Amino acid sequence: MMARKSLGFDLGPKPGKKMKPLHWTKLPDARAKGTIWDHSKSKPAQNKKMMKEILDMLDMPTFESSFCMSQRRQSVFVKPQQPRKTLMAMDVKRATAVGISLA
């Protein structure tokens, strides 16, 4: 995994597999007081140190396997050699009459 940089700060290691999307709602600033998100705005130098500590604690292969998107199985489809023949149980005129009477 390689570290990524965007908007001037480190986004952490890039996962090797496509990850599941994280659906979340934004917290108001008042509710973020005293959390990791509040500290990340005020102290960028301390944020780098904290991010490194978090990344060192994470077991990234286990993390990736837990949150990666499931891989779709590729089906093997074998086309039939000959086109299928249509079998008519009754003639077209009678089939039309039955269809009209059922409608």
Image (cartoon, helix red, strand yellow):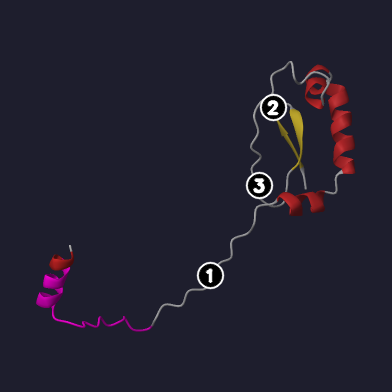
Residue depicted at x 65% and y 33%: 24
**Residue at image mark 2:** 7
Q: Are marks 3 and 1 in contact (CB under 8 Å)?
A: no
Q: Which sits earlier in the primary sequence, circle 2 or circle 3?
A: 2
Residue depicted at x 38% and y 83%: 81
Vertical relation: 25 (above or below) 59: above
**Residue at image mark 1:** 75
> How far apart, in angstroms, are the residues tagged by discs 2 and 3?
23 Å
Numbered label attached to residue 28: none
Vertical relation: 74 (above or below) 51: below
Tell me the crowding category of disc 2: few under 14, some 14 to 19, or many 20 or more residues within 10 angstroms, Cα based: few
The residues colored magenta run 81-99
Residue 10: % across, % down = 77, 32
Quarter of the image containing the C terminus?
A: bottom left
Q: Which sits earlier in the primary sequence, circle 2 or circle 1?
A: 2
**Residue at image mark 3:** 20
Considering the numbered disc 3 on the image, is that residue within a helix, a strand or a loop? Answer: loop
Q: Is residue 96 magenta?
A: yes
Residue 28 in the figure: left or right of residue 88: right
Residue depicted at x 31% and y 81%: 84
Residue depicted at x 75% and y 54%: 65
Residue 99: % across, % down = 17, 68
Image quadrant of residue 35? top right
Amino acid carrying mark 2 in the image: Leu
Q: Is residue 20 magenta?
A: no
> How far apart, in angstroms, are the residues tagged by discs 2 and 1?
41 Å
Instruction: Pick the residue in front: 34 or 102.
Output: 102
Instruction: Pick the residue in front: 7 or 101.
Output: 101
Amino acid carrying mark 3 in the image: Lys
Residue 29: % across, % down = 72, 17
